[in-house]
Amino acid sequence: MKIVTPDLAHGRRRLDKRKLASVLARRLAWHQAVHDPEREPRNGLRWLPELRRWQAARLAASFEGFMSDPKRKPAAQFFLTDLYGDRDFSRRDADIARVVPKMQRLLPQTLLETLADAVELGALSHAFDLRMAEALQRLAPRRTTLDDALYGKAYREVGLPRLRAHQIDLIVVAGYGLGHALRTRGVSTLLSVLRGPARAAGFGELQSFLERGFGAYAELDDVADFIADIERSEREVSRRLFADHPRPFESLPDAHPPAAKRTRMRNR
């Protein structure tokens, strides 16, 4: 199984801030396009809300092991609600679009890269949701609720395994990159200094997002270990779905183990 944490996050070619701002602008334009109901009519498909609800519940269920670990619970909650959950990120991403040209000199390189990854993740995930909703409309035009079997059929009909793998790559680099950036020396002070000006300038949603992430990741003993555990599960779920596994969402052995158990496993 391919595991990219943390090598992909550290091994990619670094862009200077000007080029990175250009990349981010293109990703924001794509993000806006796929969410625009006039430019993308599939946003009105009746299956889309049910699909998003079901996927959020599935991901939350896979995170149950994290919730029993006090050190990992805040980061898991942040991941579900702010990075890869069923939430409208349009205000945050609008803030990113406005803030980068003004603040790219102040924000650390790693944080700018992570914001670009987060936007791409949101755009790609929504693009997949639109394809899934369209497939569900063909497969089950009269049904109103999802189950594992129907989800798997739609997943395989949409296909695109390389893009699915890239989606997981983005989960990894965005999750790891945010944790790394927010734990960098000086970021806490920078966030405190910017709190008032950011809200006054209308960047409150982005500031809140970063502050919530800082608080959540501050509790983690090992960011790479946390993200690697998510990656391992998500890659296996994708493999099972493409293989038409009878129980694609069955937990992996020792998936998201509590802290005490992880320590015992390392010491073997």
Image (cartoon, grey):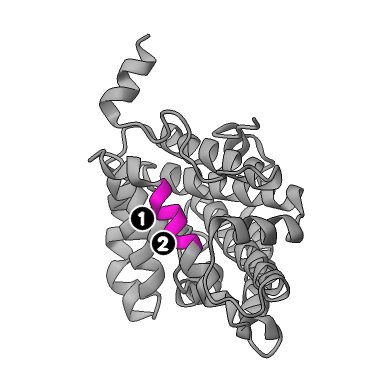
Quadrant (top left, top right, bottom left, bottom right) of the N terminus: top right
Q: Position of residue 47 (x, y in %)?
A: 59, 76
Q: Position of residue 51 (x, y in %)?
A: 54, 69
| Dominant secondary-structure state across the stretch colored magenta | helix
Query: Are the residues at dot 1 and dot 2 in contact (C-beta closer than 8 Å)?
Result: yes
204 relative to 150 in the view: left or right: left
> In the image as oriented, which residue stretches furthest toward the left?
70
Q: Which residue is mark 1?
A: 78
Seen from the viewer's position, the closer of residues 108 and 123 is 123
The image shows residue 205, relative to residue 220, as above or below, that is below
Region rendered in magenta: 55-62
Point 46% across, 72% down: residue: 92
Specify the quadrant of the image occupied by residue 67.
top left
Seen from the viewer's position, the closer of residues 17 and 86 is 86
Residue 59 is covered by the magenta coloring: yes
Point 60% across, 44% down: residue: 246
Residue 100 is covered by the magenta coloring: no
Q: Residues within 10 Å of mark 1 (few under 14, many from 20)?
A: some
Seen from the viewer's position, the closer of residues 56 and 16 is 56
Dot 1 amino acid type: Phe
Q: Which residue is mark 2?
A: 82
Point 60% across, 50% down: residue: 170
Residue 98 in view: no
Q: Position of residue 256 (x, y in %)?
A: 39, 36
Quadrant (top left, top right, bottom left, bottom right) of the C terminus: top left
